[in-house]
Structure formats: C-alpha cells, structure tokens
Amino acid sequence: MSSSTEVAVVTGASSGLGRSIAIRLAKENFHLVLASRNEEKLRSLQVEISNDGGNSTVIPTDVSSETSVDNLVVKAEEIGSVSVVINNSGLGLFSNISEHSIEDFDRQINVNLRGSFLVSRGFIPGMKNKQTGKLVFINSVAGKWGYPFSAGYVASKFGLTGLANSLRNELREDNIKVISIFPGAIDSPFWDAVNVNFPREEMMTSEDVAETVVHSIMMPGISVLEEIVMRRVQGDF
Ligand SMILES: NC(=O)c1ccc[n+]([C@@H]2O[C@H](COP(=O)([O-])OP(=O)(O)OC[C@H]3O[C@@H](n4cnc5c(N)ncnc54)[C@H](OP(=O)(O)O)[C@@H]3O)[C@@H](O)[C@H]2O)c1
C-alpha cells in the first residue's frame, strides 16, 4: 500500500464499541487497523469488513505492553498514512474499595490509561510530520464524575481526561485534533462479568455511539468537537 492510503487505527476492535467503530469507519474509506489481543475475533471482524467492501489489517496488540505497541506503530505506518487513532481498549472492574485488589486497580490503569498513553505517544510523531491527525479517546462518564464502587475505573478514566486535555493543548499548533468521548452505559460484553443488574436492553447501543464517534472524526475544517458526553435520555442507571 502507499502513503495515499488513509489509515485509521482502532484499539479494542475485537468487541463492543471498538468493533462497531471499525465497521462504521471502514465505510468512510479508511483502511482500518484492527488492534487488540484476540486475533481470532479480529480476523472474523476483518471478514465482515471485507464482505462490506472495506479494507483492514489485523495487528494483534496488547496495549499495556510497550513492545507490543511499538510493533503496532511500525506495522500500521507501513500500510499508509495513519491519520486517525482511536484509543478504545478498556475494562471496568467494580467492587467496594476494601475488595478492590491492587491487581484489579493496576490492570485498569495499565490498559485504560497507560495503554492510551503508549499508543498515542507512538503515533503522534507521524501526525506531527504531516501536520494533521485525529486522536480519539474513548473515555466514559466515569472520566467526569466519581461513581461509587468504581475507584480504579474512575481513577483510570479521570487520568485519561487529563492525558487528553494535556495532549490537546500540546498538539494544537501541529493541527492535531484531540477528541474525548464520554459515553454512559453501552450494551456490550463489558458488562458480561459485572455483578449488577442494569437492564442491557435499556442501554445505548454500540452502533449509536459509534455513529457519534465517526461524526466527530469526519467533522471538516478548522473546528474540533473536543469533548462529547453521550447518555441515554433517562440518564444514568
Ligand atoms: N460498555 C459501556 O457501558 C461503556 C461506557 C462508557 C465507556 N466505555 C468504554 O468503551 C471502551 C470499549 O468498551 P466496550 O464496552 O466495547 O467493552 P468490551 O466489549 O469489553 O471491549 C473491550 C475491548 O478492549 C480490549 N482490550 C482489553 N484489554 C486489552 C489489552 N490489554 N490490549 C488491547 N486491547 C484490550 C478487548 O480486546 P481483547 O480482549 O481482544 O484484547 C476488547 O476489544 C472502553 O474503554 C470502556 O471503558 C464503555
């Protein structure tokens, strides 16, 4: 492929919101780079994108590993010009504070925050060289409000808000748009292992949220949707 190929990287593309974003973005003529750990699920998404007439490459990646992210950056930049990076990989582990283990806390920080730092840091030099790019952070309403029983998740997402805000101000002069999306509950496998009985059918769909993400990416000209809070009309559960 060539430098005229516009590449969009989606982390956490194997499931839920990342999967929906990849499918939707492939319709905008980006070559999608599908990155997460589960290669089998990424390959099945690749087939779906291809059946829809889109193009994609699978690059198995653990965003919490520096070597794995370095590999993602090198391979994605070989495909073409990486103009969109979507930091979407994430997990939530919910419990009261006395049952919140250090391992659970560290896992959320390592994937949700450190992973987004590593991936962004890897692709920013290429965007600066071209003086254009879009860096998207899939945050959460938990990146703005301190929900209970969510200490590690809220801390990781507040950290992500700070990371995005700092990068936005650092990268304005390089014409790099930094977009943070703060969704409320989305019906996805995220909730499979969570011990709460929020009705899944009353959550937003990943397709609806993906539509908003893609709208923010496709916004032309000199403006940028810096922050979007997206909730169901009834509010939080
Ligand atoms: N669902 C909600 O209610 C909700 C609401 C607000 C915000 N969000 C945010 O939306 C994002 C996507 O969540 P989702 O709802 O789509 O959850 P999901 O269906 O559980 O998907 C999570 C994705 O993260 C990837 N991931 C986890 N650990 C990873 C690692 N170490 N390296 C690379 N990828 C990793 C998983 O892929 P592999 O297993 O293949 O690695 C998977 O593709 C998350 O950042 C989440 O915090 C979700």
Image (cartoon, rainbow, N blue to C red):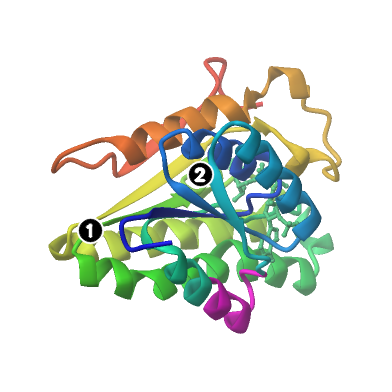
Residue ID for mark 1: 132
User: Is residue 63 in the magenta section?
Assistant: yes
Amino acid under disc 1: Thr
Query: Residue 61, position in %: x, y?
Result: 65, 68
Which numbered marker is on residue 145?
2
Q: How far apart are marks 2 and 1 (CA)?
A: 32 Å
Q: Which quarter of the figure is the N terminus placed in?
A: bottom left
The residue segment tinted magenta is 62-72
So how many labels did they put on this image? 2
Task: Quadrant for the C terminus, please.
Answer: top right
User: Which badge, 2 or 1, comes first in the chain's sequence?
Assistant: 1
Please rate how many residues cluster around mark 1, counting C-alpha atoms within 10 Å: few if below 14, some from 14 to 19, many from 20.
some
The one of 199 and 53 positioned closer to us in this rendering = 53
- State the image quarter where residue 156 is shown: bottom right
Question: Which secondary structure is most common in the magenta stretch?
Answer: helix
Relative image position of residue 10 (x, y in whole percent): 53, 53
Which SS class for mark 2?
A: loop
Please tell me the numbered disc located at residue 144. none
Please determine whether, in this image, residue 163 is positioned above or below residue 218. Answer: below
The CB of the residue at mark 2 lies under 8 Å from ligand 1: no
Of the two numbered discs 2 and 1 in the rendering, the one whose residue sits closer to the viewer? 1
Kindly identify the residue that appears in the image at 66 percent across and 61 percent down: 152
Residue at image position (44%, 37%) is 213
Does residue 62 lie above or below 38 as drawn? below
Residue that lies at the very extreme toward the front in this rendered image: 1
Identify which residue is drawn at 47% across, 59% down.
Answer: 160
On the question of residue 170 being in view, the answer is no
Assign a secondary structure to mark 1: loop
Relative image position of residue 148 (x, y in whole percent): 66, 46
